[in-house]
Amino acid sequence: MELQELRQLIAKYNAGQATPAEQEFIEAWYDSIHGEEPVLDDREWHNKEMQLHQRLQSTTGQALPLRVVKRRGGRYWRAIAAAVLILVAGAGVLYVQQYRQPVQPVAVTAAADLAPGTRRATLITEDGQHISLVNNVSALVPTGKAIQANGLIRYNNDAPASKADAGIMNTISTPRGGTYEIVLTDGTKVWLNAASSLRFPVYFAGNERTVTLDGEAYFEVAPDAAKPFHVITRQQRTDVLGTHFNINAYTDEPVITTTLTQGSVRVMGLQDSCLLQPGSQALLGKGHLSLVKEADTATAMAWQHEQFAFNNADISAIMRQLGRWYDVDVVFDGPLPAERFSGKISRNVKASTALQVLAASGINFKIEGRKIILR
């Protein structure tokens, strides 16, 4: 939450228009800044805001468990309510609906901490070659006239395609903890998230362009009315002419989520289909396709902006994302916590910093090798 957003939320609070959850959030924030002092005037507010800003800059990944002080008719009374954690890395605020204390630090040594993911992938050619694609390393890919450099593989569409090229199928695959970008011969750009793969023809022959996705990817499809573009995932096909959209089709996610940011696409399930407009989503789960007309596109696209974003997410959904990005296995030692989370975390921080955000809910974490244990 940026400072401007915080100002707007406080304005709602002062106008009596804040929701109960927003009231608890603001009251907890006030108490963290000035304890039981009276409500600040404008000058004091500005000074405290600057102090908060400086505190954020100097407190990287530090949990700030807050208590709530409510003011009613000049009297203060305490109430255990929301827990708030401010994280410098990513300039994000994550908050939960239940307060627990004390907050336990994530158990990890500096040597055992886990670094965030990087740009890396493997290209698997038609003839079975496995070519490592690493950021800032240039290489000529022998099959399909592709050149790879600086975290991008680009297929050459300048040279005339031969009949042999039309039958060549390549696959680009990112590991857990890796992302990569590819430009296909038609000019379509595809960004692959961690633990994802895209199977595609080196040259799009005939009247259609078809690729197969496993995992998550963002597409900017080059317009070509004569050749519709199709993305095949498990139990779903997405048909487009030229548009921008994201597909999350991980096998460990309960639904396939298709989010449209520009243009239009038709999503087809096993039994039904729906047409997406910008800002909408298609959700395919248990064979049923549903349409969300006003979707949270910012959360769906956060990974493209190097962030984790959660909107009322449970701990299982969050840990699936963290597990893929930090290349770790997640073990739940005991029943899952019931809290739900909203907020953002940078994807460029180490695992312990990201986990410390969640520790504000009272969940204990321990990192052992490439395993995160939750208690």
Image: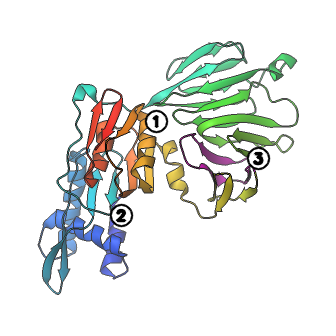
Residue 350 shows up from this direction: no
Q: Amino acid at mark 2?
A: Gln
Residue tagged 1: 324
Up-down: is 353 above or below 344? Answer: above
Q: Nearer the viewer, residue 333 or 77?
A: 333
Range of residues picked out in magenta: 242-270
Element class at badge 2:
helix
Question: In the image, which is nearer the foreground, mark 3 or mark 2?
Answer: 3
Residue tagged 3: 239
Q: Quadrant of the C terminus?
A: top left
Gap between marks 3 and 2 measured at Cα: 40 Å
Gap between marks 1 and 2 measured at Cα: 33 Å
Element class at badge 1:
helix
Q: Quadrant of residue 206?
A: top right
Question: In the image, which is nearer the foreground, mark 3 or mark 1?
Answer: 1
Q: Nearer the viewer, residue 184 or 46?
A: 184
Residue displayed at 33% across by 65% down: 6
Q: Nearer the viewer, residue 65 or 191?
A: 65
Q: Quadrant of the N terminus?
A: bottom left
Residue displayed at 70% across by 48% down: 243
Q: Residue 19: image x %, image y %?
A: 37, 75
Q: Residue 203: image x %, image y %?
A: 79, 26
Q: Amino acid at mark 1?
A: Arg
